[in-house]
Amino acid sequence: MKDRNKIDKKYKWNLNDIYENYDIWESDLEKFEKLTKEVPKFKGEIKKNPEKFVELELLMEKIAKLLDRLYLYPYMLKDLDSTDEMTSIKMQEIEMIYSKFATETAWISPEMLEIPEETMNDWIKKYPELEERKFNLSEMYRLRKHVLSEDKEELLSHFSQFMGSSSDIYAELSISDIKWNTVKFSTGEEIPVSNGVYSKILATNRNQEDRRLAFEALYKSYENSKNTFAAIYRAIVQRNVASCNARNYISSLDRALENKNIPREVYFSLVESAQENTAPLRRYVELRKQALKLKEYHYYDNSINIVDYDKVFKYDDAKEMVLKSVEPLGEDYQQKMKRAISEGWLDVFETKNKRSGAYSINIYDVHPYMLLNYQETMDDVFTLAHELGHTLHSMLSSEAQPYSTADYTIFVAEVASTFNERLILDYMLKNSNDSLEKIALLEQALGNIVGTYYIQTLFATYEYEAHKMIEEYKAITPDILSDIMFNLFKKYFGDTVTIDELQKIIWARIPHFYNSPFYVYQYATSFASSAKLYEDLKANPETREKYLTLLKSGGNNHPMEQLKLAGVDLTKKESFDAVAKEFDRLLDILEDELKKINLI
């Protein structure tokens, strides 16, 4: 793990693009509070005066843009150092101020819905400022049954900050307070096994016993607090169910789907297709087990390459590879990416108390930022391509859309990221003369299908089952959560994988479960979508514009409609079945390559 103070600034975020210091942040906070005091004067006016309605819309947008900066500045600083006391204070301050603002503005949605939809449509035609908000306004009417009366909205708003506290507690427990176990490996090296170290060992250490030691060290860090993790997750599920009941949703799943106008059949078709097509997944494990000469195959054996391939990918080399790989998307796309990788938008390396994993986050009037924990493995190259996919999506959307429709939905969010993973895969395959590297790249492609499609669908089913238990007034304990996970792993992998006792607690270390419920199924739907779009691009380069139009469309339509316009129809189960067919096709190629070098 690197010392943050010794890392060159070109590999670290330049947050000065948001604020240079907390003094300027405080100045904007005063501006925010001043603007919010103007809101009450519109109460009772917007339902009868279109000019007042437009004026309020413009004011609320100005406030929202300011809030984006005020919230994300300390949020991102905390992600760099979860123990930063000043940042923790600022985070709490802005959360409390926002909670107060939410309470004071709880009247707006109910009053807006007092305006007849026909009247609103007339106003939209008359006022250009409302024309660009047409989609969001129509969505308000579509979802009106979930908006409560003014007094009830105000009551719920008092709990807004509290409703996020469980996620905050999870972050503190899993980042700030977690104690990483130190392990001595076969090389004699003795190091604490953090999430980043664990990922690197599993991807590069060819000694199964070392991988087992790393696995046990990491998972015991979570097992030591399993009761607390389970209590946190139970609280999150209870919060979700309570919120759904309060807002007249049938279930937590329906809320996640209805807000984006996603048919239930899409979700269940995904799960059904994945569970019906586990044969290629099991074939994949058996092939790896045979090639790796393992008596038993454990889940911690999933990341090591079959061939002895542990090439180091320096970050500067990786970013140039990713840049070259996106050439099929055109010069403008490449130029935007060149800017994204050269101006302090990336925080690259793992450091003490830094948030694990990777993400891209956008600030409309600033630019996107990306967090990595780069470990110089092939997988890290693909992670870089993935996050840059998100970033370019945000750049194109922000450039083409007004603020009101610039945010794309989570449902399409992972299309651009997984599309870029396909680009870097093809680029590396094309430019490699190393047969072992080509096998490693095939494994990367197969691993992406396992991790992004099968495992995320498995995780989505776990979330659904956990929420259903609370909805049916059943208990949730660590053992119950572990049993759900164990049964799902058995359903997907059968007897091909030995499920270690500690493996069952994987639910404790998946941040999405705690921060973004019902997010993970969208990795799988996006993966299926990007597969279709990528095949279209390879077959006909002229489809590039349809794909770029999707990225530029932000949130200006329902995601299913956006995908249909780009050429993908997820209402058809065949869209998901095609992933398993592609998996089998790649397995055939891998099997042939392994036979050539006598590994099987």
Image (cartoon, grey):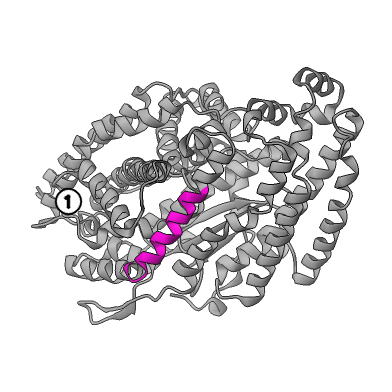
Q: Amino acid at mark 1?
A: Val
Magenta run includes residue 572: no
Q: From the viewer's side, name the closer residue of 161 and 178.
A: 161
In the rendered view, does 23 fall on the left or right side of 86? right
Above or below, comparing residue 511 to residue 274 in the picture: below
Q: From the viewer's side, name the closer residue of 76 and 57.
A: 57
Q: Residue at x 57, y 30 (%)?
A: 550
**Segment tinted magenta in the rendering:** 223-239
In the rendered view, does 576 fall on the left or right side of 232? left
- From the top left corner, tell me how far across and down residue 23 is, in percent: 80, 71
In the rendered view, does 468 fall on the left or right side of 42? left
- From the top left corner, tell me how far across and down residue 293 is, in percent: 10, 56
Q: Residue at x 14, y 51 (%)?
A: 289
Magenta part mainly helix, strand or loop?
helix
Element type at mark 1: loop
Per the image, the residue denoted by label 1 is 497
- From the top left corner, tell me how far across and down residue 52 is, in percent: 90, 34
Q: Are there few (<14), some (14-19), or many (20+) residues within 10 Å of tag 1?
A: many
Above or below, comparing residue 182 to residue 161 in the picture: below
Above or below, comparing residue 345 to residue 470 in the picture: below
- From the top left corner, tell me how far across and down residue 271 is, in percent: 33, 34
Magenta run includes residue 230: yes
